[in-house]
Image (cartoon, rainbow, N blue to C red):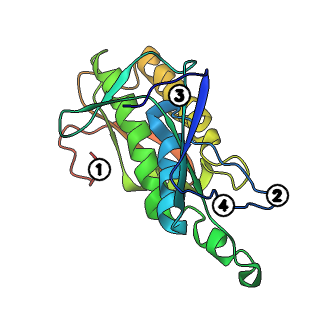
Amino acid sequence: MFSMSKPIEIVFSEKKPPSLNSPYLICGFPGTGLVGKLAVDYLIKQLGAIHMADLFSTYFSPQVVIQADGTTSIVKNSLYYVKNNKNNNNDDINKTRKNKKEIKDIIRIQLNDLKEQLLKSGVSLEFSEYALDYLAENGFDPQFGARPLKRLIQKQIVNQLSKKLLSGTIDKSHPVLVDVFDGTVVFRNDVNMHEKTIA
């Protein structure tokens, strides 16, 4: 049974830890909708990263994780590593640039959280594929990843929808479709919802 004698303990999965030369650290903080964890999980999978160690600390939240088989484990951070081939010109990393499908998966999580929040206020929200494409194109940045997405959703969807509801141009007694027309986010009531949405 694992027990801690120090505030921070690192348990290596290999007898001899790998030798890393000027490594880069990528952290997957949970964030809204676990977006940070999803992004790093994707990198681990695409790069074939190797588990290196688990980090335990008394500074972590005093809670346990319940596994699928009913057993429990204490909170930990897992460390993985990838040794880049000097001859591949970072091809592996370039291949992991978020493709459209992966980006949309992250966006769906964000939008589902928003839908649940608004549903508590009596607003049923749906999103067209055009809206999804718009967020995928404008909500991600090569340097900052998914961070601009939350601001984009707040500015272009939440704030604008609030104005429409307050002005009475949108009726919350009917489902609200978020769409994009000519590069602009638009809202409309669509009782029948004939158009395909992501819900």
Q: Is residue 12 above or below residue 1?
A: below
Q: How many marks?
A: 4
Residue nearest the observer in this picture, 116 or 45 = 45
Amino acid type of disc 1? Answer: Thr
Mark whose residue sits in front, 3 or 1:
1
Marks 3 and 1 close (CB-CB < 8 Å): no
Splitting the image into 4 quarters, where does residue 191 fall? Answer: top left
Gap between marks 1 and 4 measured at Cα? 47 Å
- Sequence-first tag of 3 and 1: 3
Residue nearest the observer in this picture, 167 or 67 = 67
* Residue 116 in the image, given as x and y percentages of width and height: 31, 26
- Sequence-first tag of 2 and 1: 2
Q: Secondary structure at mark 1?
A: loop
Amino acid type of disc 4? Answer: Pro
- Sequence-first tag of 3 and 4: 4
Mark whose residue sits in front, 3 or 2:
2
Marks 3 and 2 close (CB-CB < 8 Å): no
The tag on residue 22 is 2
- Sequence-first tag of 3 and 2: 2
Amino acid type of disc 3? Answer: Gln
Mark whose residue sits in front, 2 or 1:
2
Gap between marks 2 and 4 measured at Cα? 13 Å
Instruction: Write down the residue under mark 4.
Output: 18
Mark whose residue sits in front, 3 or 4:
4
Gap between marks 3 and 1 measured at Cα? 20 Å
